[in-house]
Amino acid sequence: MIRSGVIGFPVKHSRSPLIHGYWLKRHGIDGSYDKIEVAPDGLKAFLAGMREASFAGCNVTLPHKERAASLIPNLDERARRIGSVNTVYFSRGELSATSSDGYGFVQNLRWRNPSLDLKGRRVVMLGAGGSARAIVDELLQEGVAQVTVANRTVARAAELAESFGSRMAAAALHEADDHLRDCGLLINTTSAGIADTAKLTVAFDMLPRGALVTDISYVPLLTPFLADAQRAGCLTTDGLGMLLHQAVPGFELWFGIRPEVTDELYDIVAGDIAPGTGS
């Protein structure tokens, strides 16, 4: 049996086993994918013992993404650029890692908006933590014209912008509206209105026609941010597809088959988030 899973602290909330379990069954693979709670002080030992424990690899979630990157000897270029990982695997016998968060983000947008062309678009990103670095890196690789990072702590936005070069800009969160008139993609990476009570107030009517609005949060599926955008008549894409698409590279690395993200899989996970949502 090929063994894999997701490590985090806590990890009980993860829906990744639903995704990988679906693909394992669909492809008839003798494998497993489990939730594995690893405390911060146990991360180094877990990674060092993966081969002996018969793991082909694992996903990494909070709070381990950055520290895992510092503990794993073989990082690909993407992981080195962003300084964090979410997918661990073995390559030529060596513990290796990559990040598929940015990939998952862009593939979700394309999945739901097949004609989307990111090249030359101006992007406004709300928030500078979590997956922001991975998303910025992928967008720059896709050829966007500029990414403006708007964050409550401007210094953090400036640090992120400076680390990625000339196509970046930083702003205070309350100044985000000033950058919407030529924005082709508006991204919310904050937990405002979900994990705290500080709901975002955004002038969605300032966005040009054809702009796309997305939120990387997917619980609830329709976040307050996306609900406000829809009421303003904006085109929106929810964040669940990012979770599904970021899982694809890891599954292929561990099990040797590149799986497909389908509406059926989306409905299964959506139904777990909000029973009655899936078909």
Image: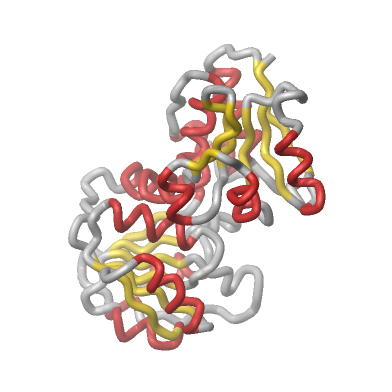
- Give residue 94's position: percent from left, percent from top: 58, 29
> 216 or 44, which is in the foreground?
44
Q: Is residue 87 above or below residue 219?
A: above
> 178 or 52, which is in the foreground?
52
Q: Is residue 174 above or below residue 236?
A: below
Residue 166 visible, this angle: yes
- Give residue 135's position: percent from left, percent from top: 42, 57
Q: How many marks?
A: 0
Q: Quadrant of residue 111?
A: top left
Which residue corresponds to the image point at 76% horizontal and 24% vertical from the top-left? 52
> 55 or 227, which is in the foreground?
55
- Quadrant into which the N terminus falls: top right
- Give residue 109's position: percent from left, percent from top: 35, 50
Q: Is residue 45 above or below residue 67?
A: above
Residue 150 lies left or right of residue 267; in this view the side is left
Which residue corresponds to the image point at 71% horizontal and 38% vertical from the top-left? 47
Residue 78 lies left or right of residue 268; in this view the side is left
- Give residue 230's position: percent from left, percent from top: 39, 66
Residue 39 lies left or right of residue 211; in this view the side is right
Residue 230 visible, this angle: no
Which residue corresponds to the image point at 59% horizontal and 14% vertical from the top-left? 29
Which residue corresponds to the image point at 60% horizontal and 55% vertical from the top-left? 66
